[in-house]
Image (cartoon, rainbow, N blue to C red):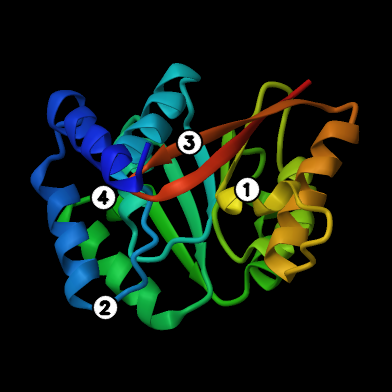
Amino acid sequence: MSELSWSKTDDFFIETLVKQDEDLLAALTVNSEANLPAIDVSPNQGKLLHIFARMMGAKRILEIGTLGGYSTLWLAKALPEDGKVITLEFEPRHAGIAAQNIRRAGLESRVTILVGPALESLPKLAHSAPFDLIFIDADKKNNPAYLQWALKYSRKGSVIIGDNVVRSGRVADAGNQDEHVAGIREFLQQQGEDDRLTATAIQTVGAKGWDGFSIAIVD
């Protein structure tokens, strides 16, 4: 199977199952026109996050890595009116574009964007915890540290999702010491060794190539 086949299948799923509203479509257009890195979650991945949040009745969500706010919109749209997404973004320009996308969707009351290094923003969130769902999708070298903060800000039953954990199979190559691959590998090893977590990881193929996500529930 080729990446072209994977992408065509993704397109079929999106056309058949993922009805993106004007807010989501506009965000993708704005992000592309602003030349943001083309690393948004795919539409069907975004809807999967949305479904996870709805399945668990999430009211408070922490997102580490905003980019242009596309995944943020999917998560915010899963919340009740009094729900909240706190999303952390390193790049001020990316955060500004995300804020525009969120404002256009009328979701400012449900979303707070914190700008700066996530490891500087995270210690300031104790008053906002615990979170029901935590989505980690930022610089992978810091994933082990993000996991520890996620655990600190969780409760029994909280769900922690990590994106891009396969890296085209490089995560399974112990000889690959790229800092982001190594960060993902340690992130997964920590989850497997932590008695507080029940975790697994799933490989995916599609418009984003060969990758996957991890999902863990706090026991």
Q: Earlier in the sequence, mark 1 or mark 4?
A: 4
Q: Are marks 3 and 4 in contact (CB under 8 Å)?
A: no
Q: Secondary structure at mark 3?
A: strand
| Residues at marks 2 and 3, CA–CA distance in whole angstroms | 25 Å
Give the amino acid type for the residue marked by disc 4 in the picture: Leu
Q: Is residue 173 left or right of residue 196?
A: left
| In this view, 212 is above or below 57 | below
From where the camera sits, is residue 132 visible? Answer: yes
Task: Name the residue at 71% across, 36% down.
Answer: 154
Q: Earlier in the sequence, mark 2 or mark 4?
A: 2
| Mark 1 vs mark 4: in front | 1
| In this view, 126 is above or below 140 | above
What numbered label is drawn on residue 35? 2
| Residues at marks 2 and 1, CA–CA distance in whole angstroms | 27 Å
Q: Secondary structure at mark 2?
A: loop
What numbered label is drawn on residue 204? 3
Q: Nearer the viewer, residue 103 or 190?
A: 190
| Mark 2 vs mark 1: in front | 1
Q: Earlier in the sequence, mark 2 or mark 3?
A: 2
Give the amino acid type for the residue marked by disc 2 in the picture: Asn
Q: Nearer the viewer, residue 96 or 28?
A: 28
What numbered label is drawn on residue 169? 1
| Mark 2 vs mark 4: in front | 2
Q: Earlier in the sequence, mark 2 or mark 1?
A: 2
- Residue 119: where, in percent of width, then height? 70, 68
Q: Is residue 7 left or right of residue 127?
A: left
| Mark 3 vs mark 4: in front | 3
